[in-house]
Each structure stands twice: as structure tokens, then as C-alpha cells.
């Protein structure tokens, strides 16, 4: 796939509750498919593993960032340029949903 057909999504999530919570799905009206992945290094080789869910520990935080968890945003439904906004819908194990509005950047945000 070309770089134009897929993009990575990065963000941070904080669980303010006293119980673990799982992010179970991500969708977007701006992309035909969205997958959660985790970058792993095995025998010196980095690869991406698809994830069915990502657990947010009680009172904890999970970062979606280069070299860790990230979204693969595939099959864009419109031409996207730097500064454009896209909508992401996050679904959690308790049935709750969170809508995020994210801006398109050329590179991953600095840490």
C-alpha cells in the first residue's frame, strides 16, 4: 500500500475511573477502515501486530505514539492535506463512546 492509502493515528487516553477500561474499536467517517496496532521488536526486527483491544489501567494513561500503540487509518474517503480535520469514534468495553477531532500532520507529534 502506498503512504497515501494509509496513515497513522496518534493520541493519548486517560482513564479517570477506578476500574480498567478497554478500547475495543475505533471507526471514522473519513476512512474506510481503522485498525489498532502495536509496534513490537522481536530479534531486532520491528513489526506491527493488530490489536483487538487496548486496556487502559484504572487511573492510568495509554499513549498511541510511534513505536507503541497506534491507529492505521486506511482507505481515506476524501483527499486529506496537512491541517485538515478528521473524526475518530472510540468505543469502549462498557459501551461508552468518545468522538475525537484530530488534525492531519505530516509527521508524528514530538514527545
Image (tube, rainbow, N blue to C red):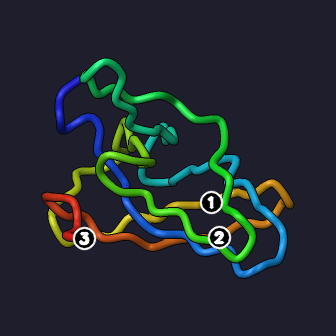
Q: Is residue 77 above or below residue 106?
A: above
Disc 1 and disc 2 in contact, CB within 8 angstroms: yes
| Marks 1/2: CA–CA distance | 5 Å
Q: Is residue 27 above or below residue 74?
A: below
- Residue ID at (71%, 81%): 16
Answer with mark 2 or mark 3, whichever residue precedes in sequence.
2
Q: In screen coordinates, is 5 left or right of 52?
A: left
In this view, the residue in front, 9 or 40, is 40
- Residue ID at (25%, 23%): 44
| Marks 1/3: CA–CA distance | 23 Å
Mark 3: which secondary structure? loop
Disc 1 and disc 3 in contact, CB within 8 angstroms: no
- Residue ID at (29%, 38%): 6
Coordinates of residue 5 in the picture (x, y in percent): 26, 34
Mark 1: which secondary structure? strand
Q: Quadrant of residue 42?
A: top left
Number of callouts in the render?
3
Query: Dot 1 corresponds to which residue?
Result: 90
Of all residues shown, which one is farthest toward the front? 43
Q: Quadrant of residue 105?
A: bottom left
Q: Which mark is residue 111?
A: 3
Q: Is residue 100 above or below residue 2?
A: below
Q: In screen coordinates, is 3 left or right of 14?
A: left
Disc 2 and disc 3 in contact, CB within 8 angstroms: no
In this view, the residue in front, 13 or 83, is 13
Query: Dot 2 corresponds to which residue?
Result: 98
- Residue ID at (25%, 69%): 84
In this view, the residue in front, 51 or 28, is 51
Amino acid at each position: 500500500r502506498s503512504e497515501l492509502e494509509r496513515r497513522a493515528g496518534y493520541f493519548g487516553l486517560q482513564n479517570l475511573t477506578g476500574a480498567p477500561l478497554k478500547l475495543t474499536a475505533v471507526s471514522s467517517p473519513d476512512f474506510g477502515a481503522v485498525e489498532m496496532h502495536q509496534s513490537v521488536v522481536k530479534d531486532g526486527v520491528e513489526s506491527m501486530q493488530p490489536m483487538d483491544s487496548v486496556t487502559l489501567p484504572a487511573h492510568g494513561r495509554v499513549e498511541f505514539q510511534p513505536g507503541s500503540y497506534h491507529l492505521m487509518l486506511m482507505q481515506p474517503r476524501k483527499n486529506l492535506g496537512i491541517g485538515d480535520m478528521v473524526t475518530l469514534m472510540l468505543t469502549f468495553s462498557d459501551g461508552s463512546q468518545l468522538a475525537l477531532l484530530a488534525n492531519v500532520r505530516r509527521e508524528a507529534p514530538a514527545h
